[in-house]
Structure formats: structure tokens, C-alpha cells
Image: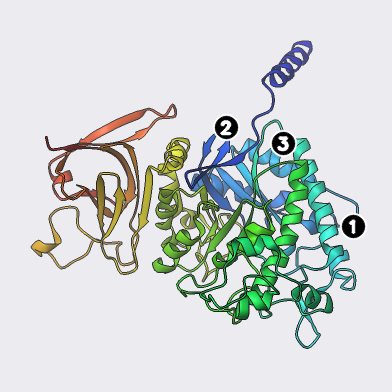
Amino acid sequence: MKNKLLLAAALACLLNAAGAAELPRLASKDGRHALLVDGKPFLILGAQAHNSSNYPGALKPVWDAARDVKANTVLMPVAWEQVEPEEGKFDFSFVDTLVAEARKNNQRLVILWFATWKNTSAQYTPAWVKLDPKRFPFNIDREGKPNYSLSPLGDETLKADKKAFVAFMTHLKKIDSTQRTVLMVQVENEVGTYGLVRDFSAKAQAAFEQPVPAAVLARKKPVGAASFATSGTWREVYGDYADEYFHAWAIARYIGEIAKAGRAVYDLPMYVNNALRNPLEQPPKPWNKDFASGGPTWDVIDIYKAAAPALDIAAPDIYNAESAQVNANLALFQRADNALFVPEIGNAAIYARYLYAAIGRGALGVAPFGIDYFNYSNFPLGSTATDKTMVEPFARVFNMFAPVQRQWAQWAFEGRTRGAAEGDDRKPQTLEFPGWTAKLTYREWQFGEVAWKMTDKFPAGTEQPGGGVAIAQISDDEFIVIGQRTRVRMEPASGTQGFQLRVEQGRFDDKGRWVMERVWNGDQVDYGLNLPAEPVMLKVKMARAK
Ligand code: DGJ
């Protein structure tokens, strides 16, 4: 007993001497971003739990699924209704259990603060909020009737949500500032309002008639109209877009205040997630009941940046599996001032290939939604399965990145990585690197060329698009290729000559050293590098003709 106590005291001294782990934070350089964890870039291989899994008794199916999918981070809600069931009386016992169990299960956490808005509604607010609409007002429609969604101009609502969030962040700091199991916090969930463009209460109307704040004017230009005023009221500056933009500003300001107050006590990176508008509608039309008005859609990211500097990221939740939509969303949310992070993507198998596209582009991370063996399926958004078959398509991909996640995040931060997913049109694609182009083709057999017409059959399992590849250029002529169901040909930039010198199939060990398993040659390289259904990792050395 005495020895044990001595040991514990020695350990505590050591921890104090070594100090707490560094705070997770975002770093940006040359328009790229990294999530630094313990001071080094970290790639979130995420698993988001179902909406009702935020109770101690519900956690086991989450850890089981997170382990099976090879996640390193679980994204888990913490609800205002559960931490402050009675006003002013806080209960963080779930947070304690969550953090303790995450550590035992070797998972990091991203916590989702479900409060004033969850998918735009007030359903996760405590009963004392729900039952007091006078103090916590809803948006008011044009006829003067209350809408289902809380107003971002409710001062008491903001005060109460902020107080609960600050209490939560204070608690988190207390239990996690040594180990830093929690990496980021999402503030609210899919904010905005369906069916109503903004609050039309007297208070909101008065604010709407004020001049647009200078910070917004400085960032958000009117869509396609040189004729609009450069300053003035929302209507004068933004015309038909004014109501939506005003609502975005009001919501962003509200969440930004909450995030700022939370960060003042414990400065974790914070983000907001988005139920997307159609990214292919270009230029975007004024809101027409077709998405949640006021949410951080791609076209109002500038308004969020101006109104809520305490939020690091506006992040896309991807539930439309069309490849043109997914690619457009990834591109629109990846900006020099906005790191790409995908906190939700459908858990149906058809989405798995997009992990290559997101991770290859240099996302901070990606998390399929509903990775949790709770007996619930959100089909048709996601999979019908709730068992291991649901996680398998994602596990295959995460399994490839898990051993290189730190190295990959570093390469991505240096701008060395690219990625692609097979398109719905099944057509060839290219990825451009300095000096080299990766030509990608899909639905091919591993032997021979399609042009030879040796067969009119397609490989089994390619009825739906399933190919994907992520490539890192680790030195001028050397590449790490990770992928599945894709034929890759590395070709030198036009005007130069090059050839494939050596292709090794292998993996990285836990010390980050390359372990070669075999050299691909002969049939295995004569027709490009054919990545099979089961993902592989290749180290490809190209050479330039002298
Ligand atoms: C997006 C939301 O952010 C999630 O919490 C969840 O409701 C999914 N939609 C649907 O399952």
C-alpha cells in the first residue's frame, strides 16, 4: 500500500514537471490548415454517435462501433437539457463518464453542444426553457405568429445558453486540461430556420433596419450586383438576399458570443456545422424555403467569419451522395480562411469512397454519422444496417489511414496531398502534382486495357461507384498511394519524360517506418496501378528520363 502511494505521488510529480499536454489548436499556413494535437498535426478519423447516445448506459455500442470502424475520435453530443435540468443546477456526470470511458477506449472526443438549436429546433433545451416562450422567444413570422425555432435575438436565451456553455467549458477544463482528450467543440447543431427566412418580431425588424455592420460589409459582397449600395441597411446593400443574410448574421453573432465566452475559460477550437444548400446552384439564388435560412451555408461563410470570429470553422454535413454535390461542397467549405472538416457524412456504403476525397484534399478530419450499434437507422440518409456491416466500408478506409494519420496530417498541411472519389459518371479523373499528373480510371479489370475489348463484363461489386484514392507526394518523384477500386497512372508533366522505377506495396509501422511487403512488377504494373476492392498502400518511385 505504502509503495503504491509513493508511486502515485511520484507519478503526479512527474506529470506536474512535464506539465499538461498542449491545448489542441488550429494552425494555418499558405492557405492550408492543421489541427495541432500535442503540438503536431492530427487527422480526425471520426465516428459520430446517434443523437440519443449521450447517456452513460448508451456508450458501449458507441465504443464498440468506433473501435470497429478504426476511429481515433468520437463525436458525441452533450445536451443543455441534461447538464442543466433545473436552472442554475448543473450536472456534468455524463461528461465525466464520457471522458473517462473515451480514455479507456483510446478515443479522443469532439463534443457537440446541443442547446438553443439542434437541427434548427429547441428540442435539446431544458424544460424550463421550452416552457417559458415569453422569456425565451421564438422567431415570429410575417403574420406575427411564433415559429418553432428560437429567435437569435432573444437576449435571455443567449444569456442562459452562454451561462450553461461556460459552466460546461469550465468543467471540461477541470477534468481534461492535463490529458486533453477533448479536441474540439461544436457549438449548437445545424442552426438556422426552416420555412421562415428570419425573425419578423418588432425587435428583429428594428435591427434589420439598422445599417449593416462594418465587419460584414468588409467581407460579404452582394451577389452579382454592382448597382447595390456599398453601405446602408441590409435591404439597401443585399437586396433580395437581405433577409437571409440578416438572419445568418443574427445567428452567427449569437453562437459567436457563446463560443467566445466558452473559449475565455477554456480555449479549445470551435466550429459550427451546416445542413447544406444546393452547392451547384451558381450563383446562389435568394432563399426560397429550400434550406435552413441563417445556417452557415457556403455563401454566408463570410458573414459568419465577420460576426463570429470565435468560431474557427463552418463545416459541411454531407447527406447528398451525388458526386457533383459532394465535390462541390468539399471545395466550397475548404478555404484559406476556413479549414475543411466534415463532422457528418452519411453512413451508407456509397459515401465511403468520399473519405479518400476529403482526406486527400487535406481535411482536418471526417466522421461518418451514426457509427453506433444503437438499434436505429437513419435510412434513407444513411445505411439500413445497424451492425458491423454498416461500419465495414468505412473501416476499410480508416484502417489504411490509421497508422499514418499523424504523418498524413503533416503532409496535408504541407500541401502534398490530393484525393478523389469515383464520380457517378464513372469517368476518368486527374490529380495534379508539381511535375506529375495522376490519371485515375475506374471499373477496369486489373489486366489489360479497356480499348482491347477483351470482355464486355465489369468486375463484380462495381455496379455502384466505389473507387477512391488519396495520394501524397512525399518527395519530388515519390508518392504514397492509398486507395481502392481505382487504376492509377502517374504521368510526367507535359514536355517531360518519366517512368515508374519501383512500386512497393506495404504499410507504415507504429514508429512511422515504411515496411515493404512486396514489389509490384510485371502484370501488376503493366496496366497502371490497379488498386483492388480491398484498399492497399503503395510507395511509388517515379524517375525522369535523363
Ligand atoms: C444532421 C444532424 O446534424 C444530425 O444530428 C442528425 O439529425 C442527422 N442530420 C440525421 O440523422
Relative horizontal placement of residue 208, taking residue 63 as reference (left or right)? right
Question: What residue sits right under mark 2 in the picture?
Answer: 39
Question: What residue sits right under mark 1 in the picture?
Answer: 86
Task: Tell me how many marks there are.
Answer: 3
Task: Tell me where residue 10 appears, x and y as whole percent.
Answer: 72, 14
- CB of mark 1 within 8 Å of CB of mark 2? no
Task: Tell me where residue 35 appears, x and y as whole percent.
Answer: 56, 42
Mark nearest the camera among 3 and 2 is 2
The image quarter containing residue 301 is: bottom right
Q: How is the image coloured?
A: rainbow
Describe the element under mark 3 as helix, strand or loop.
helix
Disc nearer the start of the sequence (3/2): 2
Q: Quadrant of the C terminus?
A: top left
Measure the C-alpha gap from mark 1 to mark 3: 25 Å
Above-or-below relation of 257 to 476 = below
Disc nearer the start of the sequence (1/2): 2
Describe the element under mark 1 as helix, strand or loop.
loop
Question: What residue sits right under mark 3 in the picture?
Answer: 176
Q: Quadrant of the N terminus?
A: top right
Q: Amino acid at mark 3?
A: Asp
Task: Identify which residue, 482 or 253, lies in the foreground.
Answer: 253
Mark nearest the camera among 1 and 2 is 2
Residue 55 is tagged as none
The image quarter containing residue 422 is: bottom left
- CB of mark 1 within 8 Å of CB of mark 3? no
Residue beneath the point at 65% across and 38% down = 181
Q: Is the C-beta of the residue carrying label 2 under 8 Å from the nearest atom of ligand 1?
A: no
Measure the C-alpha gap from mark 3 to mark 2: 16 Å
Measure the C-alpha gap from mark 1 to mark 2: 39 Å
Above-or-below relation of 8 to 338 = above
The image quarter containing residue 542 is: top left
